Image (cartoon, helix red, strand yellow):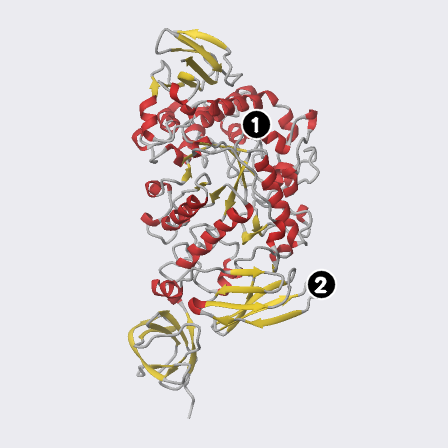
Amino acid sequence: MLDIRREFAAYLDAMNMVTVLVPKPYHAEETPTFTLETPHGERHFLQTERKWDLGTMMKYECIMNMPIEIGKRYVIYDHQGATANLQIGAVVRTPQFDDQFFYDGDLGIAYAREKTTFKVWAPTATEVKVKLIDPKTEKEKYIPLERLEKGVWTTTVFDDIEGMHYMYAVCVNDVWREAVDPYAAAVSVNGEHGVVVDLAKTRTEKPFLPPLSSPADAVIYEMHIRDFTIHPESGIIHKGKYLGLAELETKGPNHTTTGLSYLKELGVTHVELLPFHDFAGVDERNPSQQYNWGYNPLHYNAPEGSYATNPHDPYARIRELKRAIHTLQAQGIRVIMDVVYNHVYIREQSSLEKIVPGYYFRYDAYGNPANGTGVGNDIASERKMVRKWILDSVRFWVEEYHVDGFRFDLMGILDIDTMKAVREMLDAIDPSILVFGEGWDLPTPLPPERKATMQNAEKLPRIAYFNDYFRDSVKGSTFQPLDRGFALGDSDDREKVKVAISGSVRNKQGPFLHPTQTINYVESHDNHTFWDKLEIANGHESEQTKKKRQKLATAIVLLSQGIPFLHSGQEFYRTKQGIDNSYNAPDAINQIDWKRKSEHEGDIRYVQGLIRLRKSHRAFRFTTEAEINNHLFFLEPVSASIIAYHLRGVQQYGPWQDIIVIHHNQEEAQSVFLPDDEEWHVICDGDHSGTVPLFSVHKNINVVGIGTWVLVKKT
């Protein structure tokens, strides 16, 4: 007689539900029944609740009346005696799974000379081993791990194994996969293995930094480690490396100041470094052959090796990054880390997916991986062990590397509770640590009210957002190159710019509770530089006029309420030759051009003066909506080409009783009437800026050309 047994597959999709997929054809008169065999050999009947005809398959949902012990092997039998191992399916994405396996202890490795303990969270695994690799001989040794509660596996090696490479071998659904430890603090070249290191050998004390009483006191300067030093004429020895950031007194063309000394001269308080956790896209063995911004994350707690002088030495990248951060801080500059917890480089190849398949990522209603990020996967931050992984990583960078802030890439992908937990954890360590991110609302399967988007800013009052409302009203639409905002000469968005200047707070019709929630910017690593946008939208104007427009936009950024953000090179008209997405373009496109910097020293001094001015009086740095409402009043000028406002009665915040700021976006001269007949001192005009009076006026001021004027009245 013909054997009609058939292969089928069975998945645990909920704690009490098995999904069985049976291929066609099958005998139509048959109604399959299924039983479950436990690891102890007991048989339990499964009740079929629902079935679907999927065309080539039949799908059956079966209910169990017994608990499943995840991590053990179970077998499903059909009525003809055919068998299938019960595989772990969508159950990993259920709240019950999260509750049962949430673990709040340490993960990763704990090294000491006499022993090293390994811990990895792998609740769906039936076996786990650690593979130790001697980097000198490449000899391998597998050591089994013991399963503890909450799906944690551990072993202790009683020997000094410093420098050994290691991987985890994890068996899930009868498939063995090898993966780098998601908590690895050190990796081999190109992140191929984790490495056992003694972090205590690399530690230094954090330098003293002057207090930061409010996020509004920050002036953020965004830069890419390689871009900042790689230029042939940067005068920096360690070009494109962590150590390049630590070099002082470097000079470029025409004896222009470069590197760290330039940052100090400029007066910024924070540098935000594009991702420096280990990423794909640059071969660390030959880094000069490729370029990448770093948004291809591989290992979240280990530094990128292409910025190290010796990527083959696991300690080099750690020590050199720490030295760069320490040196910046010793010069009074805080360091913000750009973090990419919203996605991984390639989901299928990531350690997270290999160790606990299906858990760390979001899926849509049809069981397909979500793609709100646009790169093929979305991190499921709302799950408890994903949130823990993010929190543990953030804490690690603060405690081990002493970073002073975090810029969250695509923060709108993450959930509100996770970002709230990040902020609360950091407040307990140091409330001055900045947290901000991209609050764009992206199509990820998370309810809108749970996303950490700008629309939900009231739920995250201590977190700041990149303000595209500010950016686009001042510059014009980022995604429509010909669109022109106020600084480019179009006054249609004048009222929007006034909202932006006022900190985009709610009472002024903005989205934020506090001015400390807005990151004010007109340019970042993304999209066209401001200068390249000008070349497209205002190509009919002279170079001198375009430079005035860029200085105007930068002045609006630096004098508005909120947190000012500059893109490196913005102050001397950085260009990427019209390329709007230079994430993997060569150094010739992305590098900071120190020759160009040397040609615009006067314009840089203007930006320096604006930064000094902002720092000199807290009226430019209000922290509450109430302060803005009490002291900031717009004047009604005679022309739509002018935005003018009065910071009134602000003597308690700094050296002047009153301040007037005037932004003008046309070359035609305009007269602005002042609110009284008293003497006003002009400390900023279209060419000069700072805190020292340039000249005095009464009753009115004649503003000639495109630019910004600041007038003060002494107490």
- Nearer to us in this view, 516 or 446: 516
Q: Quadrant of the C terminus?
A: top left
> Which mark, by number, is residue 234?
none
Query: Which residue position holds label 2?
Result: 136
Q: CA distance from mark 1 to mark 2?
A: 47 Å
Q: Are marks 1 and 2 in contact (CB under 8 Å)?
A: no
> Which mark, by number, is residue 266?
1
| Residue at point 62%, 27% (across, down) | 597
- Nearer to us in this view, 102 or 677: 102
Tell me, yes or no, if residue 645 can be seen here. no
| Residue at point 42%, 90% (across, down) | 2
Measured along the vertical axis of the image, is residue 94 above or below residue 538? below
Disc 1 crowd rating (10 Å Cα; few below 14, some 14-19, many 20+) is: many
Which residue reaches farthest front? 114
The image position of residue 166, as x and y in percent, is: 60, 64
Q: Pick whichever of labels 1 and 2 is earlier in the sequence.
A: 2
Q: Secondary structure at mark 1?
A: helix
Measured along the vertical axis of the image, is residue 435 above or below residue 625? below
- Nearer to us in this view, 497 or 104: 104
User: Quadrant of the rendered structure where residue 247 is?
Assistant: top right
The image position of residue 588, as x and y in percent, is: 64, 37
The image position of residue 24, as x and y in percent, is: 39, 77
Tell me, yes or no, if residue 182 can be seen here. yes
Number of marks in the rendered image? 2
Which residue reaches farthest left? 49
User: Quadrant of the rendered structure where residue 88 is?
Assistant: bottom left
The three-letter amino acid code for the residue at tag 1 is Leu
The image position of residue 582, as x and y in percent, is: 56, 41
